[in-house]
Amino acid sequence: MITPQPFSLRIFVADGDPDGLRLVERSNWIGRAVVFPRALYPKVRGRDEFKQTGVYLLLGPRTDGDGEMLYVGEGDPVGPRLEGHYAKKDFWTRAVFFVAGPGQLNKAHVQYLEAQLVERALQAKRLPLDNGNKPAEPTLSEADRADMDVFLQNILGMLPVLGIHAFEQSPAGAASGGGILLTCQGRGVSAQGFDTPQGFVVRAGSIASQEAVPSLKIHCPNVCEVRAELLKNGVLVADGHGLRFTQNYTFSSPSIASAVVLGRSSNGRVDWKDASGATLKELQEAEVKTAISTLRNERD
């Protein structure tokens, strides 16, 4: 497992609008990200970055529920591809693409990056993909593949900072995620998980309630949509009288995680407990008290 290394980003707000065109550069890297809302495309399409070879992401609201969907593509150059999507793809409201200096990226390079990003999005199952087909990897030399793997890791490191989490893999265990292993039980099912900076992770093999209570659809329709999506993409599968998690899966909050598990509304800070019965809320409050006490001792 690659240990994350500190890095800095330089974000240039080209038109003075924080929600407008942004050019993002990473320390000690040849690449550059271009981020813009769809509404701004006619004004920015003539920039030099659109004339370069690159890989791009389109994001926008889903048509069948809450949340976003994603399209991954490549272009040599990216401009004509985005022009076509501006005319024909209705769902996207924002875009980000990655380019490099002249001669640094070619068609095979960005085809490789596209294939890798699609594969990671399919594995993470965080957002539905608008891509009709899974792109095939091109043939690259060993040296080119190594260079593109480094380029890819830099992209993946930058995307969460830009608010895009579609490619993040859930931590393998509580130790790697930095959290204490917790259990959620009720309605005849039991699940294990742990809290991380990226969200609350429910472990593979955990069992969720097969049926949701009728009131869940009225009071928490978003939880019903999440359960339906996890069933659709295979994260949850029928197993006896429950639904089994086929992989570690990261939820946006402990409460969404416990509500999905229990099939009812839930306060995750109360329903997730450690081996001694302490709730997540109690554990977090104890951590705060310890941190305050340590700080006071250091000052004294």
Image: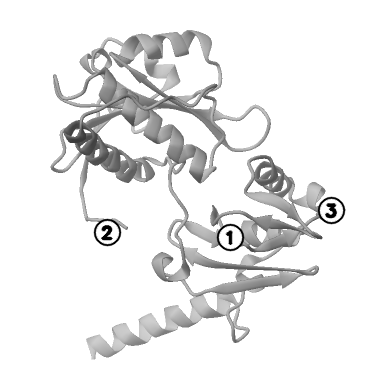
Dot 1 corresponds to which residue?
204
Give the CA distance from mark 2 to mark 1.
23 Å
Q: Amino acid at mark 3?
A: Ser
| Disc assigned to residue 215 | 3
SS at badge 3: helix
| Protein image colouring | one colour
Q: Amino acid at mark 2?
A: Thr
* Corner quadrant of residue 40: top left
Front position among marks 2 and 1: 1
Q: Residues within 10 Å of mark 2 (few under 14, many from 20)?
A: few
Q: Are marks 3 and 2 in contact (CB under 8 Å)?
A: no
Q: Earlier in the sequence, mark 2 or mark 1?
A: 2
Q: Nearer the viewer, mark 3 or mark 1?
A: 1
Image quadrant occupied by the N terminus: bottom left
Report the side of 4 relative to 232 (left or right). left
Q: Which mark is residue 3?
A: 2
Front in this rendered view, residue 140 or 54: 140
Q: Is residue 35 visible?
A: no
**In-front residue for pair 115/142:** 142
Label 2's element?
A: loop
Q: Position of residue 103 (x, y in %)?
A: 14, 20
x and y, in percent, of residue 123 in the image: 50, 43
State whether residue 197 is above or below residue 80: below
Is any part of residue 230 visible from this angle? yes
Left or right side of 37 for 191: right
**On the picture, is 300 further left or further right than 38?**
left
Secondary structure beneath dot 1 equals loop
Q: How far apart are labels 3 and 1 at the CA level?
A: 27 Å
Please name whichever residue, 30 or 62, is drawn nearer the observer in this view of the structure: 30
Amino acid type shown at disc 1: Ala
Given this view, does label 3 or label 2 mark the residue nearer the observer? 2
Q: Tell which circle, 3 or 1, labels the residue nearer the N-terminal end.
A: 1
